[in-house]
Image (cartoon, rainbow, N blue to C red):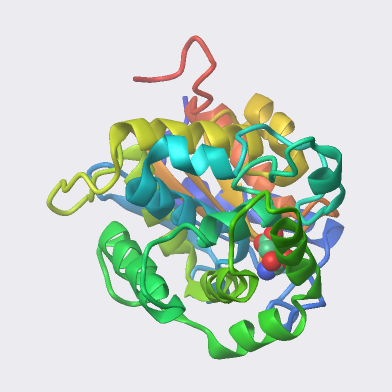
């Protein structure tokens, strides 16, 4: 069995950097399009807060779809499972993340799950607060407690670009409003959705987010239970079945722990009771996942015995 170290991660980065040429950096969103195709970075943090890193670790990127986990977390804490899953389903979709057809095909016109765009927009409509600003501040406050530091912010340029380029998301929100399947104010829900997509992270933050889940929904410093254990179970199961767009099945088999990706090329993973893992590799495949990042997670899972379904997975 391999021992985790900076040297080990450095060798992995060297070995997998060639995979960055197989993906493409998303060009439709300014700021994301400026990310470097060849960059690849990783951070792994264990429950004793030992941190191991390699590659491009100082890159700042927008959270994009990884934010869907955070909004789901707060909606569950605000309203509980019954209400949340009256609004969105919990089934994997098997189609692209921003598809609209499922809203038409499904009898009840509900989004399939909280990890697709329609579902995340619906979830944003549930979060409590008297204004979008207040709801966003609640999310940021929670996120800062989860990460254990204050050094995150919303990138105004990404936010403006999300708004400017957000017609597909507008279509999803207004369609849900038109059928009445989700009782939402489309503009307010979209505004919050665009804001959380635009939160700026570094790869270490992705690992810290994963670590929070790996630590049972408790903060690492102080051990405060911020997430009800039942909600943690629900979120991790949904990450496992829907967190990696329509490649979630492949991830469940080859990686075998809950992960969530975003189109900036970031992925965070939670290995229960063991590690929080963050990878960034802006070159993504057509399904939306970092090519090199995905390969690295597969490798780590094998080398370190992280697949929770494997009979020899460590405690
Ligand atoms: N912000 C983009 C959108 O809402 C991409 C989200 C993602 O990472 O999948 O469509």
Looking at the picture, does residue 235 appear above or below residue 18?
above
Front-most of residues 67 and 53: 67
Who's the residue at 27% across and 69% down the image?
149
Q: Position of residue 10 (x, y in %)?
A: 53, 54
Residue 279 visible at all: no
Q: In the image, is 214 to the left or to the right of 265?
A: left
Quadrant of ligand 1: it is bottom right
Looking at the picture, does residue 276 appear above or below residue 240?
below
- Extreme residue toward the top, this view: 311
Q: Quadrant of residue 70?
A: bottom left
Looking at the picture, does residue 214 appear above or below residue 207?
above
Q: Position of residue 95 (x, y in %)?
A: 83, 43
Who's the residue at 49% across and 63% down the image?
203
Q: In the image, is 44 to the left or to the right of 167?
A: left
Front-most of residues 73 and 63: 73
Who's the residue at 42% across and 73% down the image?
136
Looking at the picture, does residue 229 appear above or below residue 143?
above
Q: Position of residue 15 (x, y in %)?
A: 68, 50
Q: Quadrant of the C terminus?
A: top left
Q: Position of residue 96 (x, y in %)?
A: 82, 49
Who's the residue at 68% across and 46% down the image?
294
- Extreme residue toward the left, this view: 222
Residue 193 visible at all: yes
């Amino acid at each position: 069995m391999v021992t985790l170290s900076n040297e080990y991660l450095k060798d992995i980065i060297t070995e997998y950097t060639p995979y960055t040429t197989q993906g493409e950096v998303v060009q439709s969103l300014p700021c994301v399009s400026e990310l470097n195709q060849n960059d690849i970075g990783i951070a792994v943090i264990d429950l004793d807060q030992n941190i191991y890193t390699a590659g491009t670790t100082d890159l700042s990127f927008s959270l994009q779809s990884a934010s869907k986990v955070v909004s789901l977390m707060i909606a569950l804490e605000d309203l509980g499972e019954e209400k949340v899953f009256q609004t969105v389903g919990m089934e994997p979709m098997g189609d692209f993340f921003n598809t609209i057809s499922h809203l038409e095909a499904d009898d009840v016109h509900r989004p399939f799950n909280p990890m697709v765009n329609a579902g995340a927009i619906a979830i944003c409509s549930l979060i409590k607060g008297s204004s979008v600003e207040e709801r966003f501040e609640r999310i940021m406050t929670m996120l800062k407690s989860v990460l254990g530091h204050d050094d995150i912010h919303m990138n105004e340029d990404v936010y403006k670009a999300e708004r400017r380029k957000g017609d597909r998301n507008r279509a999803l929100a207004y369609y849900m409003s038109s059928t009445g399947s989700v009782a939402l104010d489309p503009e307010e829900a979209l505004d919050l959705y665009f804001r959380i997509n635009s939160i700026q992270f570094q790869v270490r933050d992705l690992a810290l987010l994963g670590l929070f889940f790996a630590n049972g929904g408790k903060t690492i410093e102080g051990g405060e239970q911020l997430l009800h254990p039942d909600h943690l179970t629900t979120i991790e199961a949904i990450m496992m079945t829907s967190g990696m767009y329509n490649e979630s099945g492949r991830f469940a088999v080859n990686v075998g722990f809950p992960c969530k990706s975003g189109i900036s090329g970031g992925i965070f993973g939670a290995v229960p009771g063991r590690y929080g893992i963050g990878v960034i590799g802006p070159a993504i495949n057509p399904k939306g996942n970092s090519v090199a990042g995905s390969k690295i997670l597969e490798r780590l899972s094998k080398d370190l015995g992280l697949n929770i379904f494997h009979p020899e997975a460590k405690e």
